Amino acid sequence: MTESLPVDTPGAPEGFEPAGYEPGAVERKWRERWAARAANQPDIAGAKRPFYALMMFPYPSAEGLHVGNLFAFTGNDIYARFQRLQGFDVFQPIGFDAFGIHSENHALKAGLHPMELIPANIANFTRQLERAGLMVDWSRVIDTTHPSYYKWTQWVFLKLLERGLAFKKKAAVNWCPNDKTVLANEQVENGRCERCGALVEQRLLEQWFFRITDYSERLLDGIDGLDWSHTTTTAQRSWIGRSEGAEIRFKVLNPLEDAGSAAVHVTAEVGSGAHEIKVFTTRPDTIFGATYVVVAPEHPLLDAITSYEQRAAVAEYRTVAARQDLIARKTNKEKSGVFTGSYAVNPATGDMMPVWTSDYVLMDYGTGAIMAVPGHDERDFEFATKFGLPIERVVVARDGSARAPLSEAYVDDADGGVLCNSEQFNGTPVGEAKRILTDWLESKHAAKGVVNYRLHDWCISRQRYWGPPIPVIYCDACGMVPVPEKDLPVLLPNIPDFKPDDSGVSPLARHEEWYRVPCPKCGKSARRETDVSDTFLDSGWYFLRYPSVGLDDVPFDPALTKKWLPVNSYIGGNEHAVLHLMYSRFLTMVLHEAGYVDFDEPFTKFRAHGMIIRDGAKMSKSKGNVVNPDDYFDGWGADTFRTYLMFLGPFEEGGDFRDGGISGVRSFLGRLWISARGSHTNGEPELDVMRKLHQTIRKVGEDIPKLSYNTAIAAMMEYLNTVRRGERTAHRAEVEPLVQLVAPFAPHIAEELWESFGHVKSVFDSGWPAFDSALVTQSTATIAVQVGGKTRGTVTVSPDAVEADVFAAAMADPAIAKFITGTPKKVIFVPKRLLNVVL
RNA sequence: GCGAGAGUGGCGGAACUGGCAGACGCGCAGGACUUAGGAUCCUGUGGGGCAACCCGUCCGGGUUCGACUCCCGGCUUUCGCACCA
């Protein structure tokens, strides 16, 4: 794979024979030089112009660095180095997100202990990352599994506990029988564990939760002020899932002995309404069309409202639903359900509506109960059709008939519909009707307008070993007692048998010597919490820690935090668009309220990078299309590999990795080397070349902040082609600034060439070259001449030529003039660009 | 199903606010230097046609002097979310 370049350079000055470009040697030299000079360590306490360039820290897998990681890190590094060249004190830290089920499972499989596996993985990652030539401050690395870090993760937990934002509740949770662990809803995909693919079961366990739902509104509103990738903010908004509607209360009649008989047609006056079912609906306007009510199988009132006759059927249905819950329930859309034997009163019509239970109503969302409007909801329509429940039309297109039968749910709630069969509200447009009907129901004390969110509380409990123990102690006398801050960290013990079992309790519970502790309050024997916390808690605050790494008495120093945060630029994958970024925002808001930080949004700017695919598919071991960065570092050098990755396609979209293109980038650097090493200082640089240079300086300076790296590289290639056109030798002044432009992409070769020009200081302390706006302007303009919109040729004129000049020039060219027959009806002139003659 | 993107040469991809479509690179072809070249350098390269020219940015309409770009309708595709009431 290694290739040699010619030793002699055409036109090289007498007695100077540049050695061929050998990336291996050059890169080694500069890695060592940077380390020796601590070149990548900003003055954390004293920086004048701090710039925090953060990238999402990796999970240090045993397989080593993935090109996807490298792609992301390189993209961040280029931006960071560019900011450094702009004169900022750039802080680009890195760390390792090494707790969690992934590491633990891998350790189990490999027969190793995570406490041995993880340091080895981190060492390997570090070695690979160092070769990439990242401008990373290696003196401030975070390892989430180190007690000096998770001490403060536990501290964060205690802060939430203090503020009432951490709480325990028994909850139906997703249990993966294979990984033997609880999964967050987000970790379940189509009823299967996102990691191992096993079918997920439902279990009832006591879990720790963070009350993120208290922040739904703030998390949503805050998005407006963020400079984030559009795709990311869209994902956040839809994850929060705000919807406006009404909560409507339905009185339920006591189950009547004869309920269920066909003759039942009770009036509103009958029954005492001992129970009330609350439903959430976004369509209060359709209340007149509500013909039945459905509660989720887990609904707390279900038992109370079920009639004697229906009890067996309901109980059986509920058992089946519980068993299949996340499996069939979310994938099998065939409607099923059972009548409870009770009736609810429609507050608008006074009609009796049968109450059913069905798994198409989710306990998780809204109130766990719905009013069914089969005429105007597809799911309700399907259900009503299947079970023979009445379907009423209460919305009709403006020109439609209120009697028109419904063959499917009419769901147009935008502008088309007006109410019908709704008494005094007939004719009201749907839009207004939502508000009017809510007000009306409110006046009858049957409803209130509410806002509902899809966002759920964050379950942070994991019944596993490889995580930070949740710092709580249970005492028979004192109850739940938080571990005092002075006792942090609660160390994760090094135990050999960390394998989870089927009990649903963490392996830590098997170690009495660990979990038996004196109560911090009364001193009597007590027990530790044996759950560990979610890795998203580790990564939810790590950006706060970086500037304060090494300070053991605080999680993050106030002065340093004020200086460096919020993060100026954050780059990462869109796979974390929702959870990691949402949790980080949430924790920041809480810490802000608690007075620990003076900002409430952690990441001012966020950009999601694209994904690198190969042969049109995601890289994976099973497909055998994984790229090992080491091979490319060895074969081509880090500078070539970095630049190539950035040249593949737009950074925010990713690209298709193929070996084919890499040689183009390598020969670009090779030619740069030759032109720079062979450059002369005789006389003046060529004016046309200098024009192109200054245009290139401008272009690259505009492209990098936009992360438009591929076009920046293309511009530099184009410029180098101009410099070398016709085998000409470069003037020093023509290539020296190019070395600065290339530096963020290919830092090693840039340093080497910069040094060869006689500079003592690093190229990264040389500042970004300024462009001369006089030179950027073209000396001539090539103007397209169109006749009737069709391009018929071009004319070259002065850039400030006016319409008449260009028209004259066009007429002087017979190839163009022959199309201009007769008097032009109209002439469109765009200076410096185009002349269009309309006949 | 809903939401957000994306469809441009043989390939990866450029194209500012509606103004010469195909920058840059790969590949390919020809040439130079060479004992040789898979190294390096130069030239060419959307399709058709001898040419003048014609046709070309997923498809069909539209707006405009002019559309890859804007509007309407459709197709394909990627990524989220998904019985969210």
Image (tube, helix red, strand yellow):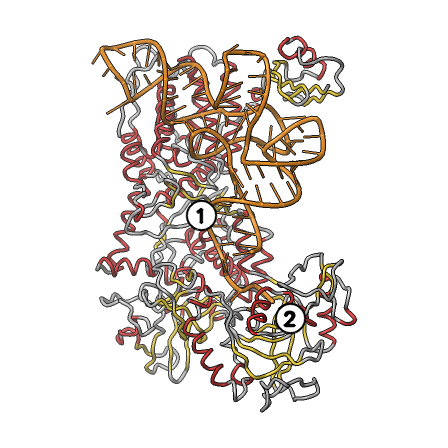
Query: Could you give the CA–CA distance between mark 1 and mark 2, rounded to whole angstroms?
Result: 50 Å
Q: Name above or below for residue A443 compared with residue A72.
A: below
Q: Name above or below for residue A487 compared with residue A261.
A: above
**A365 or A642, which is in the foreground?**
A365
Residue bearing the label numbered 2? A391
- The dot on residue A549 is none
| Pointer 1 with pointer 2, Cβ within 8 A | no
Amino acid type at image mark 2: Ile
Q: Does residue A87 show up?
A: yes
* Residue furthest to the right: A424
**A335 or B3, which is in the foreground?**
A335
- The dot on residue A572 is 1
Left or right: B16 with respect to A572?
Answer: right
Chain letter belonging to callout 1? A
Q: How many marks?
A: 2
Neighbour tally class for label 1: few under 14, some 14-19, many 20 plus, Cα within 10 Å: many
Q: Quadrant of residue A33?
A: top left
Residue A684 in the image: state x and y as whole percent.
47, 12
* Residue drawn 50% across the image and 59% down it: A588
**A232 or A693, which is in the foreground?**
A232
Q: Earlier in the sequence, mark 1 or mark 2?
A: 2
Left or right: A666 with respect to A231?
Answer: left
Amino acid type at image mark 1: Gly
Quadrant for the C terminus of chain A, please.
top right
Residue A113 in the image: state x and y as whole percent.
24, 60
Residue A496 in the image: state x and y as whole percent.
22, 66
Q: Do the residues indicated by labels 1 and 2 lie within the same chain of the protein?
A: yes
Q: Secondary structure at mark 1?
A: strand
Q: Name above or below for residue A371 compared with residue A567.
A: below
